Image (cartoon, rainbow, N blue to C red):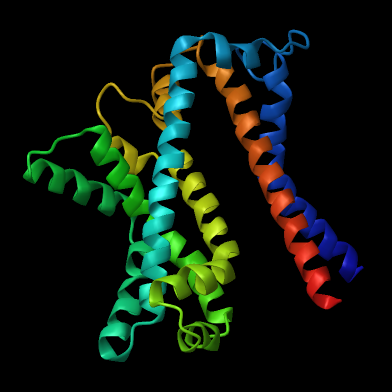
Amino acid sequence: MKKFLSLFYIFLVLAFIYVPILVLIVYSFTGSVIIGNWTGFSFELYAKLFTEERIRNMIISTVLLAVGAGILSTILGTMGAIGIYYSKGKFGKIIKGSSSISVINAEIVTGISLALVFSLITFGKTYFSLIIGHMVLCTPFVVLSVTPKLKQMDSSLYEAALDLGASPTKALFKVVIPEILPGIFSGFMLAITLSLDDYIITVFTKPETFDTISTYVYNAVKNQAKSELPALRALSAVIFLIMVIVVVIMNIRANKKVAKEAR
């Protein structure tokens, strides 16, 4: 009975999370404006993602922004994680402690702060300010992804590479980076996900004529744009499917690695 209740509780939690998404996916295959009104199986909404110029440009802009911010945040976050890990003394402890503040800080505070800074230096809202805002959001999470891999790494490997004649830079790229590569990849994927999903930082830093998925969806819902809302169901289904595929691939790779190390 106890096992049954545990399984039933898990089922309820999963149903609470995923049933709304599944309903959204099901109704992405019909052209009905209202969810609950099935008008026949159709790929019409998916076709709109490619045929309607405004939606297509919005998707391309969002993906390019996410990839660009993800790459820059991963580079900066990896460098920061390595620097924090090898920091010594009181200064190192202060840096390690302060690195987690930006993660737990309210996003609205970060957004307002960035807007005030850009206004103060008369920089305004441009694509550059948007990239900077997304990097500020994503970089701390890259640091959190890379740091555990640094702690798992045998610290003597770097020192051994130096003793064998490698320069610090060569030892970093030949020894440290390959050891922490899974953490770097996880941080990169997390950065892309955060960038794709973000609304608050985006709305405070983006140009007026630029839209990401989050701002586009908000404006469509706010303005009750019935011609645009149905296509967003298909877009949500595509994003969810991509995330599921990425998670499955990462788990398969991780299981293969564990099995290989167990031999």
- Is 218 placed above or below 70 here? above
Q: Residue 56 location, x and y as percent?
A: 49, 17
Q: Quadrant of residue 87?
A: bottom left
Quadrant assignment for the N terminus: bottom right
Can residue 54 be seen in this snapshot?
yes
- Residue at position x 27%, y 53% in the image: 110
Q: Quadrant of residue 41?
A: top right
- Residue at position x 55%, y 69% in the image: 180
For this view, does 258 lie left or right of residue 21? right
Say which of 5 and 47 sits in front.
47
Query: How many numbered marks appear?
Result: 0
For this view, does 96 lie left or right of residue 43? left
Quadrant assignment for the C terminus: bottom right
Say which of 152 and 136 sits in front.
152
Q: Residue 208 location, x and y as percent?
A: 25, 24
- Residue at position x 51%, y 73% in the image: 176
For this view, does 237 lie left or right of residue 211? right
Say which of 78 and 240 sits in front.
78
Q: Residue 79 location, x and y as percent?
A: 38, 66
